[in-house]
Amino acid sequence: MTISLQHGAAYAVVYDLEFTAWDGSMARKWMAPGEFKEVIQIGAVKVNESFSPLETFNLLLRPRLNRVLSPFIQQLTGVTNLAIEAEGIDFEDAYRCFVGFADNLPIVAFGRDDLVLWDNIRLYGLRDLPPMPAWIDIRGWLMENGIDPRGMHACDVGPRAGVPFDGHTHDGLCDALSVAAGIKALMARGARRPSVGLETIIP
């Protein structure tokens, strides 16, 4: 589902993924049997050159392998099994919708969510998909602008830049909006605009 907010020339798409997880799966790096990072939500906001929001995008996805969400991820994200059953679509359809929404604009995330998309493509053995847009990981950019990203999540970007968080933390769309708001706030204080090719990889 997309919602238009205002008019203007689009510069990039800020997005955030939520994916299956269990209590302790992050510490285990999803290495326990049957643990996969299956995407369950794609939230995104199309922004102009000042990172003001133009249009939002929000989809729930049905995981193929772990069809029942853990209590842990339901509490963390607010995405429930009932919501997935009622509104969720298959990853392949959601991926095509997301790439169509991006419309060749660079996709901007806190971290390497592009790798999670690739992992799902490989996990499901998908072929003949539209290419993923160029990606920007803003963690290095944040460090350049005085914010150490280590230990942070996407939902922390706005508050660390002085913008209060609005909504449910670890909700894909709310987190994407927080990232965009944080970037906008830092740019208003003189930071250069994030762009493709200027990423610094943070382990």
Image (cartoon, grey):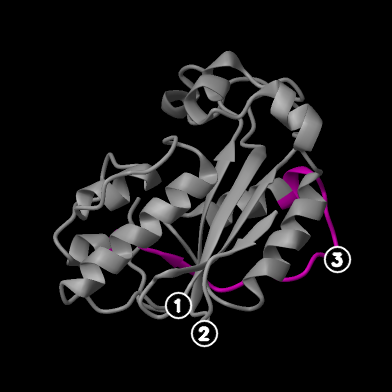
Residue 67 vs 112, above or below: the answer is above
Q: Nearer the viewer, mark 1 or mark 3?
A: 1
Do we see residue 132 in this rendering? no
Q: Label 3 sits on what residue type?
A: Asp
> Seen in the image, is 10 located left or right of residue 86?
left
Q: Is residue 122 magenta?
A: yes
- What residue is at 80 percent from the left and 65 percent from the top? 129
Give the image location of residue 14, x and y in percent: 48, 62
Sooner in the amino-acid sequence: mark 2 or mark 3:
2
Residue placed farthest to the right in the image? 128
Residue placed farthest to the front in the image? 6
Q: Could you classify mark 3 by the number of other residues whose Cα lies within 10 Å: few (under 14), some (14-19), or many (20 or more)?
A: few
Q: Are marks 2 and 1 in contact (CB under 8 Å)?
A: yes
- What residue is at 16 percent from the left and 77 percent from the top? 190
In the figure, residue 27 lies in which quadrant? top left
Residue placed farthest to the bottom in the image? 9
Q: Nearer the viewer, residue 201 or 86?
A: 86
Query: Could you tell me which secondary element the residue under label 1 belongs to?
Result: loop
Q: Which residue is mark 2?
A: 9
Q: What residue range appears in magenta? A: 121-141
Give the image location of residue 81, x and y in percent: 70, 22
- What residue is at 75 percent from the left and 52 percent from the top? 94
Q: Are marks 1 and 3 in contact (CB under 8 Å)?
A: no
Mark linked to residue 48: 1
Mark linked to residue 128: 3
Q: Label 1 sits on what residue type?
A: Asn
CA separation in Å, label 2 and label 3? 30 Å
